[in-house]
Image (cartoon, helix red, strand yellow):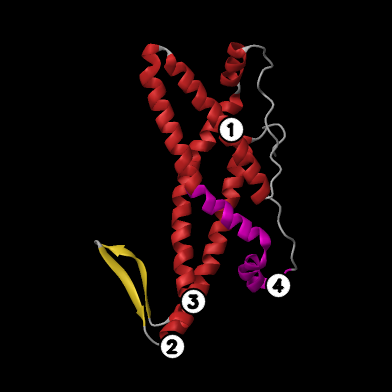
Amino acid sequence: MSETTRPDSGPAGTVLGPVLETQTYKNVLYVLLAAPLAFVYWTVLVFGFTVGLLLLIVGIGVLVLLGVVGGGRVAARFERWLANVLLDLEIRPPDDRPTAEGVRATARGYVDAPSTWRSLGFVLLKFWLGLLAVLVLFALVTALELLTAPLRYPLEIEFGTVNDQPVVWAVEGLPEAALALSLGLLLGIVLVHATNGLAYVSGRIARALLGDPQRSF
């Protein structure tokens, strides 16, 4: 992942600098997209593997499992493209599938290729990134509510539930709205750094599992 070079402006630049960088918002988009993608991947893989194993007794399960494996490689190809575009990486596709002719030999080549199983591993790991993405989305919505409080008060901001009871802050006057704005700015800065860190880790995992191990680092 490339880093934007900026002059050293001390602690303030370290804390606030990422807010002004375009890459930060590409990172946010990458992390947020993980939520729907993880749901799709997890649903297809779990359903496909379950059906394939159940149908092994009649033989067609082998085709279903091969389809799931192939789908994992397609998903990995998309994820590699997404990481290159949004995380500013240069992950090159692996070249470890043996050259073969014929349907049976080609299928065996995909099964034998280590990149196939690394791809499936990445797709499965995407589920956990998707869970974190949901938390990021919730924090982002909360930050936006706090930031816009001076324009919308009186209003109530909900922070979740405790013992099945909603935790609500009633912003009724200008002093409370100003406090909400300050908290929103603080939450936004924390969210920026947390998202950048999450995107960095995701990029390292993508390099390790989606690229050619000999050329990705």
Image side of residue 115 versus residue 170, left or right: right
Q: Residues within 10 Å of mark 4 (few under 14, many from 20)?
A: few
| The disc label shown at residue 174, or none | 2
Q: Residues within 10 Å of mark 1 (few under 14, many from 20)?
A: some
**In the figure, 134 relative to 169: above or below?**
above
Image side of residue 174 versus residue 75, left or right: left
Q: Gap between marks 2 and 4, in whole Å?
A: 33 Å
Of callouts 4 and 3, which one flags the residue occurring earlier in the amino acid sequence?
4
The residue indicated by pointer 3 is 148
Query: Camera-side residue: 208 or 126?
Result: 126
**In the figure, 212 relative to 15: above or below?**
above
Would you say the residues marked 1 and 3 are in contact, meaning their CB atoms lie under 8 Å apart? Answer: no
Q: Residues within 10 Å of mark 3 (few under 14, many from 20)?
A: some
Picture quarter containing residue 3? bottom right
**In the figure, 51 relative to 205: above or below?**
above
Residue type, label 2: Leu
| The disc label shown at residue 9, or none | 4
Q: Give the residues drawn in magenta, as a range.
A: 8-35
Of callouts 2 and 3, which one flags the residue occurring earlier in the amino acid sequence?
3
Residue type, label 4: Ser
Of callouts 2 and 4, which one flags the residue occurring earlier in the amino acid sequence?
4
Q: Which residue appears at 40% of the width and 31% of the height? A: 47
Residue 44, visible in the rendered structure = yes
Q: Gap between marks 2 and 3, in whole Å?
A: 12 Å
Q: Gap between marks 1 and 2, in whole Å?
A: 53 Å
Residue 87, visible in the rendered structure = no
The residue indicated by pointer 1 is 74
Q: Which residue appears at 41% of the width and 32% of the height? A: 46
